[in-house]
Image (spheres, rainbow, N blue to C red):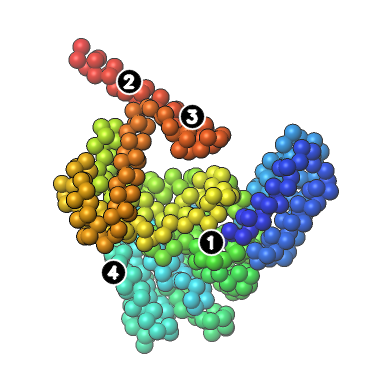
Amino acid sequence: MAFEGLTERLQQAIGKLKRKGKVSESDVNEVMREIRLALLEADVNFQVVKDFVKDVRKKATGAKVLESLTPAQQIVKIVNEQLTEVMGQEAVPLQKSEKIPTIIMMVGLQGAGKTTTLGKLALKLKNEQHARPLLIAGDVYRPAAIDQLQALGQQIEAPVFSLGTDVSPVEIVRQGLELAQEKKNDYVLIDTAGRLQIDQKLMDELKQITQLAHPDETLLTVDAMTGQNAVEVAKGFNEQLNITGVVLTKLDGDTRGGAALSIRAVTGKPIKFIGQGEKMTDLDVFYPDRMASRILGMGDMLTLIEKAQQDFDEKKAAEMQEKMRENSFDFNDFLDQMEQVQKMGPMDDLMKMIPGMANNPALKNFQIDEKQIAHIKAVVLSMTPQEREQPDILNPSRRRRIAGGSGRPIQEVNRMIKQFDQMKKMMSNISKGNLNGMEGLLGNGLSGKMAKMSLNSMVRKNKKRKLKRLKKLKKRRK
């Protein structure tokens, strides 16, 4: 995953300070050396690293930091703020035209993921802004580029304008824009040709399209896995086309993440979106402060909450809460919850967004095998509708039949049913305010106590809401 190596190295470097009660200037210099090496290994631009370390050292060697009671925490804060500054301080939204359509042109090298990103962005605009985008197939050189865009258009239910491969891209864009005006599309997304490397012919064509379309956004799609080369590509495109922003793709791959830390500093242009997955919904707004927190292993709760809000149905969540309270949670609900969580993305990625989890030794090699989830689904789907609704009737003979139907060992079926019963009891206890045993489940240390305190707080709030409802009902009856 992106930044994994960098996160580990930075935590090791800063961890040395945490073990010291008092921090000297030489201690800070040693940590700065470790940070510099960590950033260079992550493929961050050399000049960016040099400036970053210089700024952090200057702020970290001040008297207020060295003489404070928690110098290590102060230095973590400084590093976090500096990382955020290097990546751009805050998220930069898409520029919107005063009158429709808003025109977005996607540019980049071949293989960076332009066409897929175009489809993802169109879907994001549809879902979040109820937009009516038109996609223009302007890549007439890459084999099957038009077919790919048309397939994506069908998938996300967005129209695609194409004139085939025998018409010039400039003419295709001209006619596509006329159609958008006629059909009153509020967004036009133009897919353009790429090359294996920047050449003048490509740039001349893109300049002609720019002069014709006057795009509100010229977004450069960059493959994060290309490392330092991604920065050079961004620099080259910016000098020729004056791009307005960058989309970093394949950030979920085996990448060191240096491009994300370098592009803004080198080009002065913001990273607007990041692609982290193969699904059409896997395109996220780039928040520099959240990314800095993730790099330092401090989690990213805001993104996790947004993912949950995006993928969870509020009505279903309320129904589920009621079922938990009544202890009527069944295997149909269990299956539904599992599918909802899967929509949010890989479980190991979600866990790392929780503060303190990214550097938790127990989660270092944490991975949930997709096959295990498929096996659990197979067991549940091998039950009859009555068995799913009434788990208590699952006697030994029924369990043997389920094991045979799902192709799983009887021991695995028994274990899964036992875990379901335990989870059901735990959720019922939490919904009723009984948190006995929760500390042991979450850990006997500080994290367990804190989790229990927060759960207690949630329960108290629920009780207050219930009391308010009762008072309102009494008033209405009077």
The mark closer to the camera, 1 or 2, is 1
Q: Which amino acid type is shown beneath numbered disc 4?
A: Gln
Residue 368 visible in rendering? yes
Q: Secondary structure at mark 3?
A: helix
Q: Which mark is residue 234?
A: none
Residue 100 visible in rendering? no
The mark closer to the camera, 4 or 3, is 3
Residue 274 at x, y percent in the picture: 50, 60
Q: Are marks 2 and 4 in contact (CB under 8 Å)?
A: no
Give the residue pinned by disc 2: 468
Q: Quadrant of residue 404?
A: bottom left
Q: Earlier in the sequence, mark 1 or mark 4?
A: 1
Q: Nearer the viewer, residue 242 or 293?
A: 293
Give the residue pinned by disc 3: 453
Give the residue pinned by disc 1: 1
Q: Is 352 on the left-hand or right-hand side of 5? A: left
